[in-house]
Each structure stands twice: as structure tokens, then as C-alpha cells.
Amino acid sequence: MNLAIDVGNTRVKVAVFADNSLVWTDIFDKSEFEKAFHRILQKYPELTHCILAMVGSFTGNLLALVGQRLKLLTLNSDTVLPFKNEYGSPKTLGVDRMALTAAAVNRYPGKDVLIIDAGSCITYDLITSEGTYKGGAISPGLKMRYKALHTFTEKLPLLSPEQIDSLTGKDTNQSIQLGIIRAIEFEIEGFIGSFTDIYPNLTVILTGGDAEFLRERLKSDIFAHSNFLLEGLNYILEHNKH
């Protein structure tokens, strides 16, 4: 059995895989990791291997803890990946984008795939039907845009995302909601349209913490996968066992 660990800035996502099938997931604060890790080992004593992807920081003590109990692979730019990487600066490619691309190769072999990850940032990543990663784009995420309007102005309030079914805001709050959500909607649809012009049979994946909220606004035919990154981590781990 495999354990996949995705370390973010404040939260940790984990998943247990058996025979390449997802059997269990959990999310908790980084401060709870040590206790949570012991609980996972007690619940799944058959675990033998682990892959760790770190976007946020992770202490050496916690790394040692995992490595003492499981055969550990820490995902980085030196890891052997199950796709050809044409990124111009491969050492700067985020481990989250590596994992998402691996998931696309595994789940949609022989297809051109655009992966849209709507998290702290919104990332766009293209993998071709030949299994070649071409690169992508990064833009501010949903919550980051709300914080930016509030932080870099004197009077605009800090709001939480709210769907507004209109093209014109009737007050400042509605105007902010429309300006942010519609801008992301148009941005995503624009990227999908531009890529589809080049890859007519494009498969589009939407994942990340804000995927469900944004999916309601999108007209394009997309697939939503909540555990796509964790699936990709497991696929990279299996690829490196051989």
C-alpha cells in the first residue's frame, strides 16, 4: 500500500492507495501531522511506501519520522517522471504541477489534456497525446484576488466569494464579486478556447479547492477531479518503484 502526502502552506492532504485504487483521504493542519501520521499507520499497517510533495515548508524532523517508517520518495526536480518534460526551467516546475500532469498521463493516455488547478493560484498545464508536457500559465487564485483588492486599496472591503447572476453590480460589494468571478470565468474559458483551437479533441480537467465553485460558471465541457493531484503522486511513486 502507498501513502501520498501533499504538504501545502497550512494544510496537509493525504491519501492511501491499494493496487492503484484510492481507498482513503484526509485533510488536516500541518501542526497535527505527527499525530495524524501515527493514526494512519495504525489504521493501515500494510503501508510500505510513501511519496511526499511539498509546496509549503516541512521540518526535517517530520521528514525523518516518515522515512523511518516507510520507504520515502520526496518529489523534486530530480525525480523520474512518467512523461517527457519540455518546461524551459524544469528545476522551477512546482511539484503540484508535476503531480497533476502525471495524473493526466495516467488517467487519459493518448489524449491532449489541459489541467486547470484552481487553488491559491490558478495554474494551466498542457500534456499532449504523445505524453509531452508543454508548460502552462499561472495566475492569481480566487481568494488571492479578493485579498489583493482589499490590501492594495484604502476603502474596498474584504469579501468572500459569492455567485451574482448579473453583468452589472448594483453596489460596491456586487461589483467586486462580478469583477473577480467573471474575470476568472472569462480567463478560464479563454484559455480553453485558445488551446482547443490547436488541440481540437482537448480534454479539460478542473481540480483544486475552488473547482466546484467555479465549475458552476463555466460553459465548456470539463471534468472535475477532487483528488487528481494525489492520484498523480501515487502514479509517480509507482513509476519510481521499477
Image: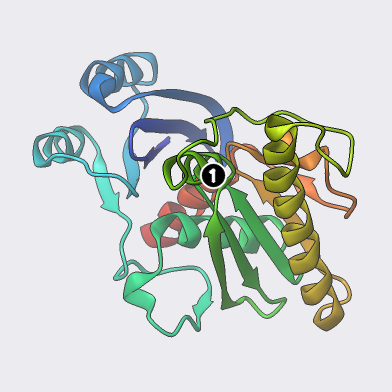
Q: Is residue 102 visible?
A: no
Name the image quarter holding residue 8. top left
Taking depth in this image into account, of 185 and 197 the one nearest to the observer is 185
**Identity, as a three-letter code, of the amino acid under mark 1:** Gly
Work out which quarter of the rendered image holds the N terminus and state it.
Answer: top left
Name the image quarter holding residue 36. top left
Q: Does residue 176 lie above or below 157 as drawn?
A: below
Please report the residue visible at 58 percent of the width from the left and 29 percent of the height from the top. 159
Please report the residue visible at 30 percent of the width from the left and 45 percent of the height from the top. 56
Task: For label 1, count other residues whose C-alpha is less than 10 Å away and answer few (under 14), some (14-19) or many (20+).
Answer: some
Q: Is residue 27 visible?
A: yes
Colour mapping: rainbow
* Left or right of residue 136, residue 219 in this image: right
Taking depth in this image into account, of 76 and 215 the one nearest to the observer is 215
Q: Does residue 76 lie above or below 52 as drawn?
A: below
Work out which quarter of the rendered image holds the C terminus and state it.
Answer: bottom left
Please report the residue visible at 45 percent of the width from the left and 40 percent of the height from the top. 154
Percent x, y of residue 169: 81, 37
Percent x, y of residue 114: 70, 65
User: SS of the residue at dot 1?
Assistant: loop
Residue position for label 1: 119
Percent x, y of residue 153: 47, 45
Percent x, y of residue 59: 14, 39
Please report the residue visible at 46 percent of the width from the left and 31 percent of the height from the top. 16
Label count reads: 1
Residue closest to the far front:
155
Taking depth in this image into account, of 103 and 137 the one nearest to the observer is 137
